[in-house]
Amino acid sequence: MRIALVFDLDGTLVDVSNSYKEAIVRTAQLFRPGTDRSAIEERMRSMKGMPNLNNDWDATYYILQVLDGKEPKVRRDERWLEVKKAFQSIYLGRELYIRSYNEMPTVPVCRGLIENETLNISRGTLDKLSGIQKGIVTSRPRLEALYALENSYLGEYFSVEKVVSLDDVEKEKPDPEPLLKMKELLDADKYYYVGDNVDDAIASKRAGYTSIIINEKWGDIAIPTIDDLPGLFNLYDSK
C-alpha cells in the first residue's frame, strides 16, 4: 500500500513557542498596554481545543475581544486587519515584512520572532521516514512556510512543490480544501496528516485522511512526540 505522510508546520514540525505564541502575547499587550502576560497566556490555554482558531491572527483578535469584555467572535474587520499587521510586524521583523507586503511594518522592530524558531522533529526521525512520500499543509503564508524550509534541515527532506500554504487555497483549516489540494500533489492509497490541534483533526476527517495528533486525543491516532512517528510504521530499523 502506498502511503503519504502530510505534516502541519507550526507546533508540529516547528517549535513556535518563542515565535508565534510570543507574537500573540506581544501583540495583545500592544493593543492593551499594561495587560499582564499571565492573563494572555491563560486565555491561550483556555482556547486549546477550540475549533476555528488555527490562525494566530484570529486567535490574537479573539483574545483581545475576551480581554475587552466583548463577545469573543472573530470578525475580519478593520480592527482585525490592524491586529494582523502588528502581529506580522512583530513576527517577521522589518526585512521580511517588507518582502512580504512591500510596505513598512506598523510596529518598528528589526529582528522578527521568526528567527527564534527551532525544529521539533529530529534528523533521525526524518531519515527513518525517507521512504515515505511527504508533504506539508500549513496555514502560514507561502513566504513564511518556505522560510522555515530554507533556514533549517527541513529543506533537505521536503520539496517546495509539495507545500500547500495559506496563499494556495481560498479556505484554510479546518476546511478540508488544503488537504484535498495536497492529494492532487501526492499519489497514495492512504493519507495521514500529522498535526497538533483540533482543527488539524477536523480537517483530516473532512478530507479523508487518518489524523495523527501529537500529545492530544482529538484525532484518530495520538503520539507523545513527533519523534514517535516512525514507530507507527515499523521504521525503527530504518536508516
Image (cartoon, rainbow, N blue to C red):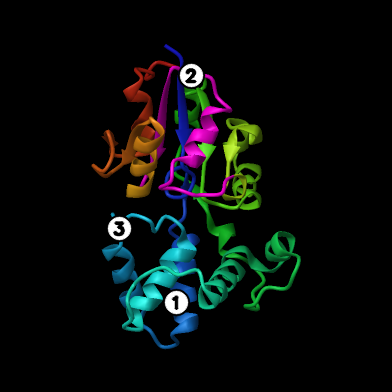
Residue at position x 63%, y 48% from top?
Answer: 142
Disc 1: which residue: 28
Q: Which mark is residue 162?
A: none
Q: Which mark is residue 188?
A: 2
Discs 2, 3 touching: Cβ within 8 Å: no
Label 2 neighbour load within 10 Å: few <14, some 14-19, many 20+? some
Discs 1, 2 touching: Cβ within 8 Å: no
Instruction: Report the span colored magenta.
Output: 169-196
Marks 2 and 3, how far apart in space?
32 Å
Residue 224 image point, x, y percent: 28, 39
Circle nearer the N terminus (1, 2): 1
Residue 154 image point, x, y percent: 57, 37
Magenta span includes 195 = yes
Circle nearer the N terminus (1, 3): 1
Residue 235 image point, x, y percent: 39, 18
Residue 151 image point, x, y percent: 64, 46
Disc 3: which residue: 48
Label 3 neighbour load within 10 Å: few <14, some 14-19, many 20+? few
Magenta span includes 233 = no
Q: Amino acid at mark 2?
A: Ala
Q: Amino acid at mark 3?
A: Lys
Q: Is residue 205 above or below residue 134?
A: below
Residue at position x 45%, y 65% from top?
Answer: 58
